[in-house]
Image: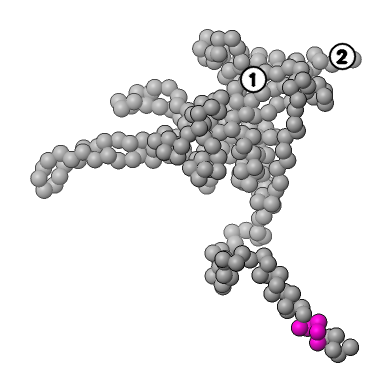
């Protein structure tokens, strides 16, 4: 019995060392300072890990023969609306999430809404950071000096996002569904004189590709419950945002604002929205 006890005492530490070494790569040496956050105060009462451990379920695979009806619509999300304030949360705005992922090549940024023209990192930098030539005076010679400065984009400049989505009826499950295809941040464009030149699309992100990344990015919970983590994937999948339709697929490929203005524009947007819901109800008879 004593011999077995001694063998157990010798074997257990050996197994523990083996388990630790098995989890640690050969090229990494564990030290007391290996964890950069060790010893830092925790800005919470518990460590929040649910968001990082969350698994994103893939979309159900569809067959072309099962799509009985579909319609493409484009929406506009204005971050200044009360329900959309999470998009402009100062600590980490939504546009910062997309920009960092695109610059780190975690996501592909596209120059068009059909996702046919991928943008390089230099393309993204030139799009978001404007180069300007300023004139200064040399204090010693009094001569004019022309310098090129880079004006970095302020996340507060992004007031709106465009969302491209498809509404469709799937015959196999007899359900009316919707899926987001793309998201694009937009900002107001001005010329050198400061005159307003319209809206400028920075880039498009293919949403099905971005779902896994967005599921790990925590968004501010607008329901006054900090213990319930909410991610950006939750917001888009559960549609916790306010928006209006500014375009639907049409033979002229034009936006509503191209032929209507003011209140008529909003009424037409509401009419398209009602038509989508009416189609689903008209599929059934009782």
Q: Nearer the viewer, mark 2 or mark 1?
A: 1
Asked whether residue 246 is drawn in magenta, I would say no
In this rendered view, identify the residue nearer to me: 24 or 171. Answer: 24
Res. 123 image quadrant? top left
217 shown above or below 202: below
Percent x, y for residue 72? 64, 20
Q: How many marks?
A: 2
Task: Please give the residue where the numbered disc 2 appears in the rendered image.
Answer: 285
* Residue at disc 2, secondary structure: loop
Percent x, y for residue 229? 67, 47
Looking at the image, residue 47 sits to the left or right of residue 28; the answer is right
Percent x, y for residue 138? 15, 45
Where is the C terminus found, in terms of image quarters?
top right
In this rendered view, identify the residue nearer to me: 92 or 8. Answer: 8
In this rendered view, identify the residue nearer to me: 131 or 18. Answer: 18
| Whether residue 36 is visible | yes
For the record, the magenta segment spans: 6-10
Q: Residue at x 84, y 16 (%)?
A: 284
Asked whether residue 9 is drawn in magenta, I would say yes
| Whether residue 39 is visible | no
Where is the N terminus found, in terms of image quarters?
bottom right
Task: Please give the residue where the numbered disc 1 appears in the rendered image.
Answer: 72
Q: Earlier in the sequence, mark 2 or mark 1?
A: 1
In this rendered view, identify the residue nearer to me: 69 or 232. Answer: 69
Q: Residue at x 60, y 67 (%)?
A: 26
Density class for disc 2 (Cα within 10 Å; few <14, some 14-19, many ≥20) is: few
25 shown above or below 259: below
**Colour mapping used in the image:** one colour
* Secondary structure predominantly adopted by residues drawn in magenta: helix
201 shown above or below 105: above
Percent x, y for residue 37? 56, 63
């Amino acid at each position: 019995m004593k011999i077995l006890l001694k063998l157990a005492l010798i074997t257990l530490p050996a197994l523990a060392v083996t388990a630790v070494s098995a989890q640690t790569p050969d090229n990494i040496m564990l030290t007391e300072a290996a964890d950069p956050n060790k010893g830092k105060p925790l800005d919470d009462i518990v460590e929040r890990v649910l968001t990082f451990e969350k698994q994103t379920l893939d979309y159900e695979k569809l067959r072309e023969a099962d799509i009985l009806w579909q319609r493409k619509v484009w929406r506009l999300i204005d971050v200044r609306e009360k329900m959309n304030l999470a998009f402009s949360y100062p600590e980490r705005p939504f546009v910062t999430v997309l920009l960092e992922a695109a610059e780190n090549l975690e996501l592909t940024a596209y120059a068009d809404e059909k996702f046919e023209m991928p943008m390089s990192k230099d393309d993204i930098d030139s799009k978001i950071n404007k180069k300007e030539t300023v004139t200064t005076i040399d204090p010693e010679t009094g001569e004019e000096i022309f310098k090129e400065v880079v004006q970095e984009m302020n996340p507060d400049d992004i007031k709106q996002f465009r969302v491209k989505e498809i509404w469709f009826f799937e015959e196999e499950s007899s359900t009316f569904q919707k899926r987001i295809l793309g998201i694009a941040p937009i900002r107001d464009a001005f010329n050198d004189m400061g005159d307003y030149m319209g809206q400028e699309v920075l880039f498009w992100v293919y949403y099905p590709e971005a779902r896994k990344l967005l599921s790990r990015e925590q968004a501010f919970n607008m329901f006054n419950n900090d213990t319930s983590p909410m991610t950006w994937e939750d917001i888009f999948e559960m549609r916790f945002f306010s928006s209006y339709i500014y375009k639907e697929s049409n033979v002229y490929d034009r936006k509503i604002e191209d032929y209507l203005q003011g209140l008529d524009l909003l009424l037409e947007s509401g009419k398209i929205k009602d038509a989508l819901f009416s189609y689903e109800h008209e599929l059934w008879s009782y």
